[in-house]
Amino acid sequence: MKWDAIISGLPATEPDETRHPVHRAYYRTLFLSDLHLGTRAFQAEALLDFLKHNDADTIYLVGDIVDFWRVQRSPYWPQSHNDVVQKLLRKVRKGARIIYVPGNHDEALRAYCGTHFGGIELHRDFIHTTADGRRFLVIHGDEFDVVVRYAQWLAFLGDRSYEFLLWCNHPLNWARKRLGFGYWSLSAFLKHQVKQAVNFMGEFEQALKEEAERFEVDGIICGHIHHAANHKSGNIHYVNCGDWVESCTAIAEDHDGQLHLISWPQAREAVAIEAKATTNANASLAPTMTDNNTKHQNSETGGVIG
């Protein structure tokens, strides 16, 4: 399944949101990585909800957006995945700039770097300059994963095991939801408990920092390891976008150039609480406004009704 084929097969429009206006946060830049479109693990509904509530002048797709590894062996492309692609294309049509930096799961697209698909720019890597003048290298990061680079058969084997853990998340969270608990990722929990995985993430971060120093930039923004981060160590600011199969995280740059890590499951709860508070406030104001209108009408008629 090719990227241009995916785009050409999409409907021209998507469901109209104007009838149901929502509160939107508007950023200078958003960074998303590791969506893994084309897999059952991709949390499409969560990302659609995120994109409905968050907008930006520029959106970076930092690799592993379409998972060609799994699409080729077991295609899975429901309507919700079409909706995500259409949502992104709609943002382009509305004036947003979208820059796509392919990763290892969508490395077939690296052959097209320097071109555009549906208005989306493809680049091997990119230098992003924040509003406060700092320069960040944007790269997926698989080049610094020794397993992916030198033993791809082992990467495929690990990918199958990881896929099984992600599958386990679905029945587990179905049961948790029935019991009144929130979302929890078994695969993320196990990954952070295994010492080798923790060591790998530390080594990966160090390798990316050294690459940033080689490019003489202030920081690096990447993905690949499904572990969100946003911190400065020494002279280098290390940022990892996380993923949309486990943690549902993104990086947002505000209009002052500051970078923020958004964990959407937690942020969504805050949005829901704010929306509920606004609804309740509007409801409490409605009787007051009605009373004021009645009093105004009475004063115009000398207080005589009927």
Image (cartoon, rainbow, N blue to C red):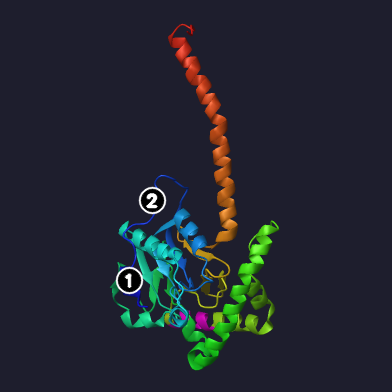
Q: Is residue 42 above or below residue 110?
A: above
Residue 153 lies left or right of residue 132; in this view the side is: right
* Tag 1 secondary structure: strand
Secondary structure mostly seen in the magenta stretch: helix
Is residue 259 visible in this depiction of the protein?
Answer: no
Q: Is residue 53 above or below residue 241?
A: above
Q: Residue at x 58, y 67 (%)?
A: 247
Query: Residue 43's x, y, as percent?
Result: 52, 66
Query: Residue 44's x, y, as percent?
Result: 49, 64
Region in magenta = 207-214
Query: In the rendered view of the protein, which quadrant contains the N terminus?
Result: bottom left
Query: Magenta includes 208?
Result: yes
Q: Quadrant of residue 87?
A: bottom left
- Which label number is shown at residue 205? none
Is residue 264 visible in this depiction of the protein?
Answer: yes
CB atoms at circles 1 and 2 under 8 Å apart? no
* Tag 2 secondary structure: loop
Q: Residue at x 50, y 20 (%)?
A: 292
Number of residues whose C-alpha sits closer than 10 Å to that of mark 2, classed few (under 14), some (14–19) or many (20 or more): few
Q: Quadrant of residue 163?
A: bottom right
Q: What amino acid type is highlighted by mark number 2?
A: Asp
Query: Residue 140's x, y, as percent?
Result: 46, 77
Query: Residue 32's x, y, as percent?
Result: 47, 68
Which residue has dot 1 on it? 121
Which residue has dot 2 on it? 16
Q: CA distance from mark 1 to mark 2?
A: 26 Å
Q: Earlier in the sequence, mark 1 or mark 2?
A: 2
Q: Residue at x 41, y 44 (%)?
A: 19
